[in-house]
Image (tube, rainbow, N blue to C red):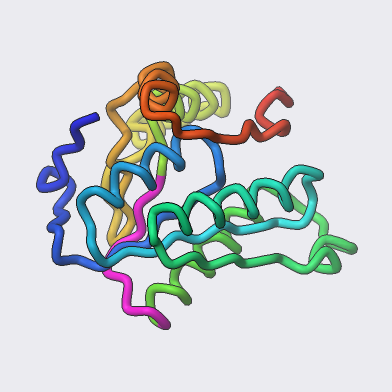
Amino acid sequence: MFIPWSEFQCTSQQKVLIGCSGGVDSMVLLHCAAQFFPKMGAVYIHHGWRKTADQELEHVRQFCEKLHVPFHAEVIPPTHWDNFQGSWELEARNLRYAIFERLMQEFRYEKVLLGHHRDDVVETVLINQLRGTGLSGMKGIPSIRGPYVRPLISFPKSSLIQFAQTHAISWMDDESNADV
């Protein structure tokens, strides 16, 4: 899979952090980034509410060891959610970005690479339309926003699955993705 890194304002000299959930998109991204960036790390964020999260964390850790990529595991304490009221998805997103920011400062990562793909863009635009968005919501997910880069944004999920199968990259499916 050819990723035109320069189109995403990335150079091989940069130190990057991969946000890795263990899904096919982030595992393919981790694999591809490891071929280009000699200085990189990966982070798995365990939100504390899904049964398979412990397995995913270990799966990502083992893949990072195989690639010789430094691994960060961040676990949100289950008590964080005890009396939480509001959107769990929005709160989880806010927590992820706070963790990315902290790790960038602490380990001097210059960019955070995220595994969003073309199907995610389509889904975001459709959800925004259902909410009655204006023109800005029709754009979907930007490929670059500050230090956050989404180099797989033009690839459909089917091509990521095919690439992963061809290159024997294993991944885990998040059971919550089946919840409409």
Q: Residue 156 versus residue 129: which sits nearer the camera?
A: 156
Q: Quadrant of residue 176?
A: top right
Q: Quadrant of residue 161?
A: top left
Which stretch is magenta? 106-114
In percent of width and height, residue 121 lies at 40, 29
> Relative to residue 143, is residue 24 depicted above or below?
above
Q: Is residue 76 left or right of residue 33?
A: right
Q: Residue 108 versus residue 101: which sits nearer the camera?
A: 108
In percent of width and height, residue 137 lies at 41, 34
> Relative to residue 167, is residue 95 depicted above or below?
below
Q: Residue 154 versus residue 31: which sits nearer the camera?
A: 31
> Residue at position x 44%, y 60% from top?
42
Q: Residue 24 versus residue 121: which sits nearer the camera?
A: 24
Q: Is residue 14 left or right of residue 139?
A: left
In percent of width and height, residue 124 lies at 48, 30
> Residue at position x 39%, y 64% from top?
41
**Quadrant housing the C terminus:** top right
